[in-house]
Amino acid sequence: MNVLLLISLGLTAITGLLCMLMLARMGALQTLAQDLREQLERQALLLSDMIQADQHIQARINQLSIDVIHREVYKGPEDRYQLAIKAAADGEDLKGLMQTHGLSTDEASLILSLHGHPEKTATTRQNQAVAS
């Protein structure tokens, strides 16, 4: 009977030891699972940021594509700047460039100074100096 008691105590001790090992492993697994959840949340945030950046880049690419298309359209003979340059070379004055071609004062002045007749450009500068 003593032998049976010793065997049952031994089995109980072994079972208790195995339960303790399993409990320790479960704690380690829970910690690991929590760490993995946190990593997954961080990666989800990073992925969200990357998606937003990608959308921003795609929108910018689309805008640049539109700009390129507009530039191609304006390269033709109907470009208002080209028409303004031709008009300045033909002798149109500052106000005429502004009204006819929809230019700002600075744009019209620049076109006149670069492409206008020298005597008309000097007159335009004098008129601007007087107006200021």
Image: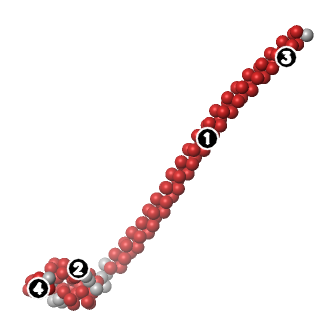
What's the mark number on residue 99?
A: none
Where is residue 96 shown, x and y percent of the image? Answer: 21, 90
Instruction: Compute the Cα span from label 4 to label 2.
Output: 19 Å
Instruction: Compute the Cα span from label 1 to label 4.
Output: 77 Å
Q: Hey, what amino acid is under mark 1?
A: Gln
Q: Name the residue at the right extreme.
A: 1
Q: Depth check: 70 or 109 in front?
A: 109
Q: Which residue is mark 1?
A: 34
Where is residue 106 shown, x and y percent of the image? Answer: 21, 79
Instruction: Compute the Cα span from label 3 to label 2.
Output: 102 Å
State which tag comes first along the sequence, 1 or 3.
3
- Which marked residue is nearer to the observer: mark 1 or mark 2? 1
Which part of the image, by quadrant, shows the C terminus? bottom left
Q: Is residue 109 left or right of residue 4?
A: left
Image point (23%, 85%), residue name:
84
Q: Depth check: 50 or 126 in front?
A: 126
Instruction: Compute the Cα span from label 3 to label 4.
Output: 116 Å
Give residue 121's quadrant in the image: bottom left
SS category of the residue bearing label 4? helix
Mark 4 and mark 2 residues within 8 Å of each other at the beta carbon: no
Where is residue 125 shown, x and y percent of the image? Answer: 12, 83
State which tag comes first along the sequence, 1 or 2.
1
- Which marked residue is nearer to the observer: mark 3 or mark 2? 3
